[in-house]
Amino acid sequence: MNLDWAHFTPGSSLAGGLLIGLSVAAFLLLNGRVLGISGILGGLLRPIKGDLGWRLAFLLGLLASAWLTAFFMPANWVLSARIDASEGALMLAGLLVGLGTRYGSGCTSGHGVCGLSRLSPRSMVATLTFMLMGFLVVYVLKHGF
Amino acid sequence: MGFKGQKMKHRVSEFLVGLLFGLGLMLSGMTDPSKVLGFLDLFGAWDPSLAFVMGGAVGVGALAYVFAKKKSTSFFGNALDFSDSSDIDRPLVIGAAMFGAGWGLAGFCPGPAIVCMGSGQSKAILFVVFMLLGMLLFELLEFVRHQKRTPQA
């Protein structure tokens, strides 16, 4: 195994992780809710009266993070995203992520962060599964052929 | 504070939590699919940054959950949602495997994809549209399954 020192960002990644943890803590302790993006999105597609406002408020905030940083924040906060996947791959990946996260009841935030934070065996299994599958798919795509 | 005020307090908090979460994702570098794929590529030039993100997030999150378990309600006075299902079943594993495959294919999971969509990247918008279609497909399959289980008399 060799490390990619050029792209490794332990400091800002840890700092960003702490902010993510803080938002999980605030959502739980203030609003009483689990911060899971796929569940928040999925609930919009099964509309129940009185259950939409909090989802929309959260998602608006999430979108606003991209809008506000573009104007007000120093350069290292501004979103830089290199999307290498082809259009076809993105469509297939989108379907898999949408269906899979709903079928498996969570994604990186709900299972990965919240679930591991409370030592949920269910979330540990889910996190291990999607991590291993991610490693496997990238291995096959990059080194398999 | 009246009902309206309570509601407003919640909406403002939810918005700010979403904002903070998005800022954390951005600062961590996780809104960049190539960086996520750099973590998932264990046998190439490996970028362990994602492990630091998870470490920081779970560290703070664990403290919050330890604290929350001693309480019965949130600071705003409503019930705490622990969603305490403990079943390790087929849907959990199959769903997580599908998610992992899509994650490895594009480098996007739902949160970062939404933030990237906010920045107006057309490829991120495409991903989110198909992610929502995948979620709709789930709702459709659930609906069909439910209909089969409870046939109309």
Image: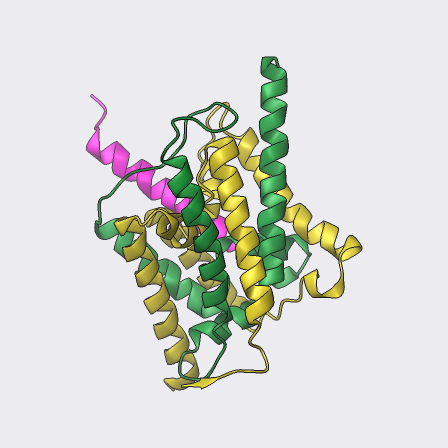
Residue interval drawn in magenta:
B129-153
Q: Is residue B40 left or right of residue A53?
A: left
| Quadrant of the rendered image containing residue A127 | bottom left
Q: Is residue B18 left or right of residue B63?
A: right
Badge count: 0
Task: Tell me where residue B51 appears, x and y as whole percent.
Answer: 45, 67
Residue placed most toward the observer, B90 or A64: A64
A134 relative to A16, above or below:
below
Image point (69%, 61%), residue name: A77
Q: The chain shown in green is which? A: B
Q: Residue at x 39, y 50 (%)?
A: A117
Q: Provide the letter of the chain coloured yellow.
A: A
**Does the magenta portion include B150?**
yes
Image point (41%, 53%), residue name: A107
Q: Is residue A51 visible?
A: yes
Is B11 included in the stretch rendered in magenta?
no
Q: Residue furthest top?
A: B2
Which quadrant of the figure contains the C terminus of chain A?
bottom left
- Compared with residue A118, is residue A137 higher up or lower down, i.e. above or below? below
Q: Quadrant of the N terminus of chain A?
A: bottom left
Q: Residue B61 at x, y = what percent?
A: 45, 48
Left/right placement of residue B107 relative to residue A135 reads right
